Amino acid sequence: MWFTLSYIAWAISAALALWMLYDWFKTDTSYSEEQLTSSREGEIEAVSEKHKV
């Protein structure tokens, strides 16, 4: 029983690692380095969250 659970846990771990590698490759090929390291999201939030006092 414990051996089976151990193998299942290793299989889930391997599947998650492969999924992370796939997502990393997909993101790296879809977006430029400049876009991934920009702080554009912060600028958008700063503009949209202007508070009037």
Image (cartoon, rainbow, N blue to C red):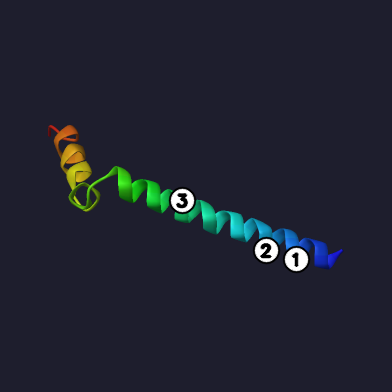
Task: Give whichever of discs 3 and 2 has the lower sequence position.
Answer: 2
Mark 1 belongs to which amino acid?
A: Ser
In the rendering, at what x and y percent does residue 8 appear?
73, 58
Front-lying residue, 23 or 44: 23
Q: For mark 3, give the secondary structure.
A: helix
Q: How many badges with numbers are in the image?
A: 3
Q: Mark 3 points at which residue?
A: 22
Q: Mark 2 points at which residue?
A: 10
Residue 10 in the image: above or below residue 38 = below
The image quadrant of residue 50 is top left
Identify residue for label 1: 6
Helix, strand, or loop for circle 2? Answer: helix
Instruction: For marks 1 and 2, give the CA distance.
Output: 6 Å
**Camera-side residue: 48 or 28?**
28
Cα distance between the residues tagged 1 and 3 = 24 Å
Looking at the rendered structure, the kind of residue marked 3 is Tyr
Whether residues under marks 3 and 2 lie with C-beta atoms below 8 angstroms apart, the answer is no
